[in-house]
């Protein structure tokens, strides 16, 4: 039996946007200016292609252009907002969205709110007109031409801004916090009975958004992270008892550390927030590191920033979004690990040479590589098609190779984490023992 998450029914009074289903605006009544081929709403993609025993297979509506639109393109005004931390590929998405709407659909105007959701408040700066000339070359650079910010804003004020600005569709580019905010916007819009669509594009360098293959920017992050691990290996092998320590981003999920460790194949230990480890004790990291140095004379350790959660107490510093600030002095696991290693070997009377590399912000600021540039373009195209067809309260994402409309409430229930299969691959590449 296949469990279908809706056919995105026509908007009606009393629709519960808090439920686990996406929605549509009023029935599409405008012909698409695109030549086709078109996708029917009944076309689905399975979320879990591999099952064992009796099960209910989950499916999502397939993304792509529709023959009928909910908006008259020549009268449509669209807006884009980028939120949260920087990530490779943001400008690629902004550019392709703007061009797809303007050149393919003939949308009247596309604007960009500046510095995240704050740009939609009374404190915000004037929006930017995202014309084809303005966005022509922005994909060549990292960061976000619109700027970004963290922190919760008043949902009612944001919706009032959309209504006052005559916005028909809002594209929200961001991670889990942005997705929750986008859902709140959809709920408030529904409560007010406004014909405004909200479509999200998943952006997080941590790749921790559930139910999709990956978020954009992740492939670029692995590429740069691999280079950092390779550099640590060179440094470690260049000195007697050389130790290279690399800290990589990964707040609650260690996907960058895990994938980069596999890609480099030069790390000997990988520490992730998902899997427990001990530093002290006969089976801890320090003991294993000492054995490694005695045997091979060098070692490389990769750690995800989220390992710093073990250092947190009730008064731990948090960012405006409420997340633990792992870059703060008390929670920065990289320096803590380095100091712990140095102290251990000093007390043991064993000289070591330790080099520490933290490429986090270098990775975040990088322009998208070729793989991410292609993915960003496809996500942007899918988002434009979904919005013009009246899809709302959804994010567009690739599910097992097929682009789909994913109801936002389903995604925000949990975050993706490194599973046992990937963790096994990591430990087989590093050869590390159980560090407990």
Image (tube, rainbow, N blue to C red):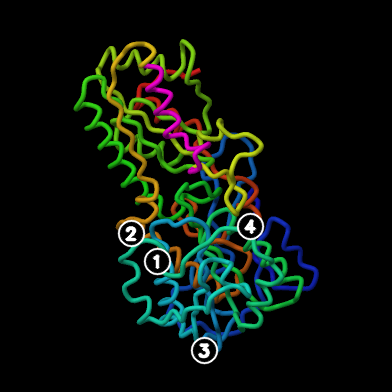
> Under tag 3, what secondary structure?
helix
Q: Which residue is mark 4?
A: 180
Q: Is residue 59 left or right of residue 102?
A: right
**One can see residue 177 in this view:** yes
> Under tag 1, what secondary structure?
helix
Work out whether 50 lies above or below 39.
above
Q: Which residue is mark 3?
A: 74
CA gap between label 1 and label 3 equals: 25 Å
Q: Is residue 248 left or right of residue 323?
A: left
Q: Which residue is mark 2?
A: 367
Q: 161 or 149: which is nearer to us?
A: 149
Q: Residue at x 27, y 24 (%)?
A: 353
Task: Give the mark nearer the N terminus: 4 vs 1.
Answer: 1
Task: Give the mark nearer the N terminus: 1 vs 3.
Answer: 3
Q: Which residues are magenta?
A: 327-345
Residue 305 is situated, as x and y percent measured from the top left of the image, at 47, 38
Could you say which quadrant of the image residue 248 lies in?
top left
Q: Is residue 229 left or right of residue 59?
A: left
CA gap between label 4 and label 1 equals: 22 Å
The numbered mark at residue 91 is 1
């Amino acid at each position: 039996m296949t469990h279908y998450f809706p056919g995105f029914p026509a908007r009606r009074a009393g629709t519960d946007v808090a439920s686990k289903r996406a929605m549509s605006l009023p029935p599409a009544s405008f012909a698409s200016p695109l030549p086709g081929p078109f996708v029917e709403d009944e076309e689905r993609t399975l979320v879990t292609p591999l099952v064992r025993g009796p099960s209910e297979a989950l499916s999502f509506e397939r993304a792509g252009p529709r023959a009928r639109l909910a908006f008259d393109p020549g009268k449509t005004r669209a807006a884009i907002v980028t939120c949260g931390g920087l990530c490779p590929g943001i400008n690629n998405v902004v550019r392709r969205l703007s061009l797809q709407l303007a050149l393919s659909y003939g949308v009247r105007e596309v604007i960009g709110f500046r510095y995240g959701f704050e740009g939609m408040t009374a404190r915000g700066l004037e929006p930017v007109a995202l014309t084809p000339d303005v966005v022509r070359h922005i994909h060549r650079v990292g960061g976000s031409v619109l700027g970004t910010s963290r922190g919760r804003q008043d949902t009612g004020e944001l919706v009032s801004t959309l209504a006052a600005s005559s916005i028909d569709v809002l594209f929200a580019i961001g991670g889990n916090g942005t997705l929750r905010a986008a859902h709140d916007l959809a709920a408030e819009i529904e409560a007010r009975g406004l014909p405004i669509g909200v479509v999200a594009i998943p952006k997080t360098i941590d790749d921790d958004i559930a139910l999709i293959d990956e978020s954009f920017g992740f492939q670029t992050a692995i590429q740069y992270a691999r280079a950092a691990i390779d550099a640590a290996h060179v440094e470690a092998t260049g000195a007697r008892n050389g130790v290279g320590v690399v800290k990589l981003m990964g707040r609650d999920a260690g996907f960058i550390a895990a994938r980069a460790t596999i890609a480099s194949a030069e790390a000997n230990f990988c520490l992730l927030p998902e899997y427990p480890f001990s530093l002290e004790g006969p089976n801890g990291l320090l003991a294993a590191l000492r054995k490694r140095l005695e045997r091979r004379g060098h070692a490389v350790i990769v750690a995800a920033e989220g390992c710093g959660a073990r250092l947190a107490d009730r008064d731990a510093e948090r960012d405006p979004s409420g997340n633990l600030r792992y870059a703060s002095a008390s929670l920065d696991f990289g320096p803590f690990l380095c100091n712990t290693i140095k102290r251990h070997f000093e007390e043991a009377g064993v000289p070591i040479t330790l080099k520490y590399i933290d490429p986090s912000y270098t990775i975040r600021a990088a322009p998208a590589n070729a793989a991410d540039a292609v993915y960003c373009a496809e996500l942007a195209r899918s988002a434009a098609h979904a919005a013009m067809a009246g899809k709302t309260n959804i994010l567009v994402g690739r599910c097992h190779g097929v682009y789909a409309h994913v109801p936002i409430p389903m995604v925000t229930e949990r975050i993706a984490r490194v599973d046992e299969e990937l963790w096994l691959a990591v430990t087989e590449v590093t050869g590390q023992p159980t560090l407990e």
